[in-house]
Image: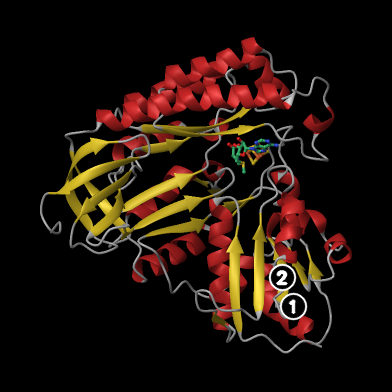
Amino acid sequence: MNTPPKTFRIKSFGCQMNVYDGERIFELLNENGLTAAAEGADADLVVLNTCHIREKAADKAYSDVGRLRREDGSRPMVALAGCVAQAEGAEAKARSPMIDIVVGPQAYHRLPEMVAQASRGARPVDTDMPAISKFDALPKRRRANPSAFLTIQEGCDKFCTYCVVPYTRGAEISRPRSDIIAEAQALVESGAREIVLLGQNVNAWEHEKLEFADLIRTIAGIDGLERIRYTTSHPVNMSDELIVAHAEVGKLMPFLHLPVQSGSNRILKAMNRSHTVETYLAIIDKMRAARPDIALSGDFIVGFPGETEEDFEATLQVVDAVGYASAYSFKYSARPGTPAATMEDQIPREIMDDRLQRLQDRINTHQLAFNRSKVGLETQILIERGGRHPGQMIGRSPWLQSVHLETSANPGDLIDVTLVSAGPNSMTGAARQKKAA
Ligand code: SAM
Ligand code: SF4
């Protein structure tokens, strides 16, 4: 028997979809009478919302669990949530006696009930992936950051040969349009000025013959909402309608995160990416024709099995051809159960380290060039939070750059600025007037 918890803490790791799930779990526990533990204070319940995308994720989660033991030997109730929970299932209880609850990403709406069971001494596990949406069972949104996440699509049917997502998040499902609009409206009523639509393949969203571009146009009609972003997109789902929306929908920000992974068609085929370098670059060309100032971002994997120096050089060429404003790059990580994990020609770590360094240097060069190209420009930023110094605030430009400036404006204000200087990771701005009308 455990005493029923009164306070909780959630630690989210990994992607933005996990951050979103963490927010929903927060609201759910709040609605069920638990309160968030104060900063630095002990919590009665700790939810570890884990990520499984790269190596050692499970080991890291177990060592995080171990660290929750307090100095006096007592411990909080522990819920292992997220993709490690999904992958490990009941095994997690055997590996760590400290884990009271194991709950997968499609089952966390059941958490209050599972907490009650754990309080009675049970160790419940739920890693089902029910067809009925967990979203129906979650409370209405009542808290929102100026820039708020909204998951509209989950899971993946694409089965890239290196990736665990189709196994941990399940099949691709799109949330119904009316639910998304209701949640977007609730977020705006709670203070969001920007909504970031999320999905593993967000642009694959479809519902009752409507496609993603239609959804964006509907959401753009919400009064009080100023900006729309979305991530992550897959090249094969980049429709012409979505590209046209970038030219026509003023609230849709000029930013596209479109992972390519590799610049070699041979490697893309082995990755089962179902696009080529040429089809990827053709999308970029079309997008630039529709929205010339679009900022481009991507994901890259170096050291996929069989990747030669020539294949890697081809990746650097794509980086130069696109001129990314930002990009994420990863060393290939063999994930048990995925086809690539047993492919021949696994690449030695030293080669991966070297390639990652060279790739990141090249990306940084383009990132700095992109930031410098915006110096002197008059634009608007959405203030998101306070900066390190008194009077300093941090906001985002339309191109998702972090902009630091001195202003009396508050989080949620959209203000006119001139971008005055550029660094590799952020810009400095000067407010042109206190608040936009
Ligand atoms: N669905 C998105 C797509 O296909 O572009 C990406 C989702 S995935 C959660 C985010 C990124 O993690 C991928 O784009 C890929 O670059 C990286 N990733 C996934 N599996 C990986 C692995 N086994 N090793 C290294 N990076 C990986
Ligand atoms: Fe993973 Fe590929 Fe699906 Fe993206 S598209 S989530 S990389 S399987």
**Residue 342: percent from left, percent from top:** 85, 29
Residue 21 visible in the displayed image: yes
Comparing 161 with 241, the one in front is 161
**Residue 325: percent from left, percent from top:** 39, 31
Mark in front: 2 vs 1: 2
* Three-letter amino acid code at the position of disc 2: Ala
Position of 376 relative to 314 (above/below) = below
Comparing 435 with 227, the one in front is 435
> Distance of mark 2 from mark 1, alpha carbons?
9 Å
Q: Label 1: which residue?
A: 114
Q: Label 2: which residue?
A: 79
Q: Residues within 10 Å of mark 2 (few under 14, many from 20)?
A: many
Q: Are marks 2 and 1 in contact (CB under 8 Å)?
A: yes
Position of 126 relative to 327 (above/below) = below
Comparing 286 with 95, the one in front is 95
Residue 169 lies left or right of residue 278; in this view the side is right
